Amino acid sequence: MRTLGEARQSIHVQAYLLTSRSIARALQEARARGVAVEILADREMVRKGENSLIPKLAAEGIPVWLETRYGNAHNKVLLIDGGGDQGIVITGSYNLTWSAQARIAENLLILRGNPALARRYLDNWRRHRDDAERLSGEVR
């Protein structure tokens, strides 16, 4: 995802499912550039999803929290530099999967130029993280 390459300070991810190798690679590349990358994911989809890339990203040092409070943590948000003046919010029906990219009719909205909105999304991300469990080791 090209827009992830614009990140300078941070990327916050809220994902129901993440199986897209290109998105995972973009997150790894951002981290290698010094961008702080953090992920919130649905615990059951990480647990059940044999193709989930979340455990791999966590093993490579990207902090991951698993949402357990809800029946489904069905959020699909990428927040780029959310605390700054150039924050970008990416959201929509688009799961972070190859299928969403290649096989499914999805929508994706990229919101720029509204730092107040980006900060609200970041506050919401943090609220969800505070209720989540840090992924460490194997998912049970």
Image (cartoon, rainbow, N blue to C red):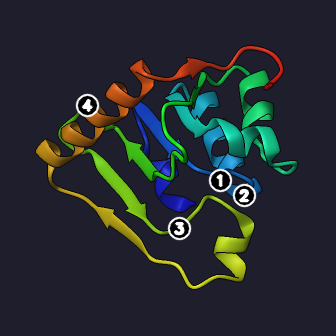
Which of the two marks, 4 or 2, is nearer to us in this view? 4
Q: Is residue 15 left or right of residue 138?
A: left
Q: Earlier in the sequence, mark 3 or mark 1?
A: 1
Q: Give the alpha-carbon distance from disc 4 to disc 2, as whole Å.
A: 26 Å
**Three-letter amino acid code at the position of disc 4:** Asp
Disc marking residue 123: 4
Q: Nearer the viewer, residue 44 or 86?
A: 44
Q: Residue at x 43, y 22 (%)?
A: 131
Residue 47 drawn above or below residue 18 = above
Q: Earlier in the sequence, mark 3 or mark 2?
A: 2
Q: Is residue 2 left or right of residue 125?
A: right
**Three-letter amino acid code at the position of disc 3:** Tyr
Q: Is residue 137 left or right of residue 86?
A: right
> Which residue in the structure is indicated by mark 2?
20
Tag 1 secondary structure:
helix
Disc marking residue 23: 1
**Three-letter amino acid code at the position of disc 1:** Ile
- Badge 2, how many Cα within 10 Å: few under 14, some, many 20+? many
Q: Give the alpha-carbon distance from disc 4 to disc 3, as whole Å.
A: 22 Å
Tag 2 secondary structure:
loop
Tag 3 secondary structure:
loop
Q: Give the alpha-carbon distance from disc 2 to disc 1, as whole Å.
A: 5 Å
Which of the two marks, 3 or 1, is nearer to us in this view? 3
